[in-house]
Image (cartoon, coloured by chain):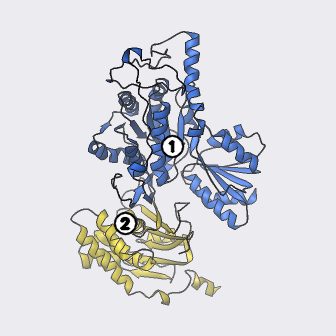
Chain colours: A yellow, B blue
Amino acid sequence: MKSDERYEIRFSGSGGQGIITAAVVMADGVGAYDNQHVCQTQSYGPEARGGKSKAEVVISGSPIDYPKALRVDLLLAMTQTACDAYFSDIKSNGLLVVDSSLVKQLPSSRSVSIPFTQIAREKIGRELVANMVALGAVGFLCGQVSLEGLEKALLSRVPKGTEQMNSEALHAGIEEARKINLALLPKSVFSEWEDEL
Amino acid sequence: MESINESKQKKILLQGNEAIVAGALAAGCRFFAGYPITPASEISEILSVKLPEVGGTFIQMEDEIASMGAVIGASLAGVKAMTATSGPGFSLIQENLGYGCIAEVPCVIINVMRGGPSTGLPTSPSQGDVQMARWGTHGDHPIIVLAVSSVADCFSVTIKAFNLSEKYRIPVIILSDEVVAHTRESVTLPKQGQIRIFDRVKPDVPPEWYKPYADNNRGVPDMAAFGDGYRHHVTGLVHDEKGFPTQDAQEIDKFLRRIHTKVSKGFQDIQITKTHLMEDAEVCVIAYGSVARSALRAVRDARKLGVKAGLVQLVTLFPFPRKAVDTYLRQCRVAIVPEMNLGQMSREIGRVNQAGCRIVKHNRIDGQLITPEEILKHITTV
């Protein structure tokens, strides 16, 4: 990445899904273990469970000026509502990653669908860690963080006694993402519309 | 949060509020009294754990009036002390803040600005307390107000605040806002040995010669702590050199002028501004707090479009850095002042603008951070 370029990730879903935790771990993985500049912000409001939740991570080779996302490179949507609300901020060559257990209507074919919640429930045994499954996939797909650094950050941030479960969830996400061939996706999130025009 | 005494400097991810705590502890703060309030609560929460670990004291008080009283008391006993609050709590702080000013008690007050007036917008950023920070407590009083815009700032400006409060025996207010408070950034904190710390000057005369409010060449009297063996009377009434109330017109005038001139003597040390791309700038953006970050982005984008734009970031809001701002107003044809209020700082800038520079205000009061795009639009159209 050129020094003043930014890579912006937005994690979105509903309150209680661990959206902010996922973003904090991502930021920690990038900032503390990968020596990149990183800035993490989140929606901060009275809504607790059920409300729309969003958290952003901006990564750059040089100190970051504006702390929030300007044009999103990777959007993770863990609910349909979040997907609908935040899709429009994505760059044309950005990537949409959705939890296909909960997002059924895709606004673009330039997207990756992985059933994070289902994987968390069936492979790990707890729906609670769907955020970490998603984080694994996002970490792999964005190419901005070393997976080793991401795991170190995760282990330092999750409650004692849950390390193994969270770590397994992260790896499950990474493995799912490995199966995706990004080269097969359309070049632009808007490409189908452009073709129609 | 990692220990700041760690010998190896390591990059860590910190929130603005966490960095204020780290800065306060590094500066030697060992007393905190406060009452939790969004979006400043993390400061109390973390200090309630960290202060006892370093032999300090944390008290949750019944309200912010009492908090400020406790902070002043602790400082008079010789301990570096602070409190942290937001909007409604900052209103209550004002009561005892004036006591801190007249009794010349070093202390630091953090106000993480949220939307107001009243309970207003508890979870949204704002810059609505700028003039209140300067004039919130009654009477002609001296005060120092600093603003933070990043996590790194939160650490270094908090240290600076303690140093200034100790050096000039004055309450120092730090204005943060919800965006700065809750943004996490990777930072490398300096080692404790690399940090310059200023401690208040204590008297070295025999106790019977000590005059707690006697003038000297700095205008800042030496300060004995309660319990040091020096008799020391402290009052909110205007007082003479010995600290006792006075009605003598000459003494009153001398005292009140001294507590103002001690600050003006230190302007060079106190008035901090930072500049970016100002060398050849024709248009400048003057900003502070989180908005300064949007402004920096806008200025960089403007340069890419060929516009000679620069940023003047105010770290010290009061005493207003008139000299520095005046220089840039003379250099530029337009100054854009974006603020999350209706123009509390642009009024100050207009006040010192003798060069006839055009001042363009950009104000947002909807609880949202001003974006780079909004500022860039002004830069490219003025």
Regarding residue A3, the answer to whether it shows in the image is yes
Image quadrant containing the C terminus of chain A: bottom right
Q: Nearer the viewer, residue B313 or B179?
A: B313
- Viewer-proximal residue, B83 or B244? B244
Read off the chain for label 1: B
Residue at 28 percent of width and 71 percent of height: A166
Q: How many marks?
A: 2
Lateral position of residue B35 relative to residue B293, left or right: left
Spatial CA distance of label 2 from label 1 is: 28 Å
Q: Which mark is residue B355?
A: none
Local secondary structure at mark 2: helix
Q: Residues within 10 Å of mark 1 (few under 14, many from 20)?
A: many
Instruction: Residue under label 1, please give it.
Output: B175
The residue sitting at the top extreme is B248
Residue A23 sits above or below residue B272 on the image? below
The outermost residue toward the left is: A161
- Residue B105 vs A78, above or below: the answer is above
Asked which quadrant contains residue B228, the reply is top left
Which kind of residue does numbered mark 1 sit on?
Leu
Q: Residue at x 48, y 77 (%)?
A: A96
Q: Nearer the viewer, residue A133 or B47?
A: B47
Q: Amino acid at mark 2?
A: Val
| Residue A25 numbered tag | 2
